Image (cartoon, rainbow, N blue to C red):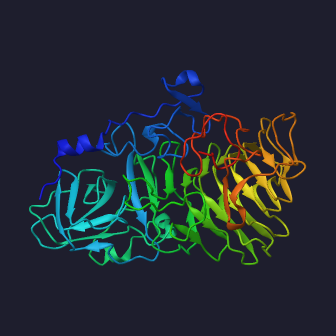
Amino acid sequence: MRFLTPALLLAAMACQAPTPATPCAAASDCPPGHLCDAFYGYCIAAAGRDGGAADRLHLDAALRDSAIDTASPDAAGPPLQIFRSVGPNNRAPLASHSGSLSVYSGVANIAPGPGDRIGVGDILAYSAYSGGGYDTAAMIVRRISATSYEVRTMDGDSAPDTSSDTTMWKIFRAHTSLAEALRGDLNSGLQSLGLTLPPETGDLVGSNRVLNILCYADAVDTESASLGEVTTSPVHRVRIYTPHLASEVGVSQRHAGTWSESVYTIRNNFSEDILVSADHVTIEGLQIDVVDTGGYNVGVSVYAVGAGARIEVLGCIFRGDGAASGPEYIAAEIWESNEGATLRLANNLIYGMGGGFESACAICAFSSRIEAYHNTIVDAPIGAQVVLPCPGILAINNLFADCDRPADGRFIDGTDYNATTSANLGYVTTTSPSHDRVGQVFGFVAATACNFHLTAGDSGARNAGSTLPQVTTDIDGQPRTVPRDIGADEVE
């Protein structure tokens, strides 16, 4: 069974050789069609490679998902992309023995197909040699079709060929929780076959790797996840995201701009859903349930990161309980970190963060710098707050609806183009923003059903934003148009 030859595979995938990421200090350092993003210190594409669907922010292709073809993690050039899937509580095989498998030149063909929920990061265990057991584990790095997948070894080489068609194969999620993935613990179902995977949390710079963790909606993820002792750089990042493209999975695991019970969600009854203490991390497309336990409850907490750290949270939905009783109730924060660190929040929807008698802000800066672009924040005592003396918050194109105080504290000069239902925004800068909009009435599709997409008839946020080259799509992955809409959603 040989569905795709290497030549046909290359034609089908239309792959281009990866190009090294270009460091920059100014736009003049970048190649044509690129801009310099000071957040990364690297060039970003001025327009999305596929209309904006693949990336919320368009970092140069070499920094994201086009460097799969690096021959060796030790070779100079783009880093090797490592993919690991997370399927909460799912230790059993996703598929096994249900069809005939052949692996040839790095392509696994299975007939009939193993199902639409199989995707990038999943681990194919199979028999490649004559011993008859499960002797090979390969990661899926690209979904070609419902029956064909590109597979690589853990070192990035093409997976070994099968000597003939075989029914001795199983497909597993690599990990059974995000916390397990960040610890480097393997799905016990894979371990039961006698297979191991090298841990990927460590020195990503020294091994010249990017760690991609893809989160699937097998169940609600109920374990608090913590990422700490890993060496990263702007190029050698940890990227935690939900797959949604046809080249990743057959059925999207990402929300469509409103809360859904059928996509990946992390929810736990501890202090933080996700704690980040590594310097270069991307979190993209997750649903994060901030549960009130009467204590300190935070969705994403960035803690003790160093100078030059760049953490980004993109296109996520944070949902609160609406009336928290604990002392701290926060969607995203940065604290006890170096003043040279930056947390970027873009295209996020945050709602229901009411309550909290010490700190109850959707976005809180206790230290360092926050860049808040195109977020929609609804029903929070404080939308964005600079709590302690620090570099502060740069807020552009954010929508604040029904917040007791949309913003509080000294914000970074350049803050502007924000809109609110309140009579004033409440922040302080040394300059005088001239494009903020106060006392607005926003046209949401269905606010009572927590659908905060803008209607075509909205007059409070539509076409009132600033054009930010760093943000080219909205929370749904739709391209942003000019003039830009304020908030997470861009009306089509």
Q: Would you say 59 lies left or right of 70 here?
A: right
Inspect this view and state whether residue 336 appears.
no
Give the residue displayed 29% in from the left and 55% down from the top.
145
Q: Would you say 314 lies left or right of 352 here?
A: left
Give the residue displayed 79% in from the left and 62% down from the top.
380
| Residue 381 position within the rendered picture, expressed as x and y whole percent measured from the top left | 83, 62
Q: Would you say 83 lies left or right of 110 here?
A: right
| Residue 78 position within the rendered picture, expressed as x and y whole percent measured from the top left | 39, 39
Q: Would you say 263 lies left or right of 37 here?
A: left
**Front position in the image: 450 or 160:** 450
- Residue 454 sits above or below residue 253 on the image: above
| Residue 273 position within the rendered picture, expressed as x and y whole percent measured from the top left | 62, 68
User: What is the quadrant of the C terminus in the image?
Assistant: top right
Inspect this view and state whether residue 473 appears.
yes
As drawn, the residue found furthest toward the top would be 28
As drawn, the residue found furthest toward the right would be 423
| Residue 59 position within the rendered picture, expressed as x and y whole percent measured from the top left | 51, 39
Give the residue displayed 29% in from the left and 59% down from the top.
146
Give the residue displayed 69% in from the left and 50% down from the top.
375
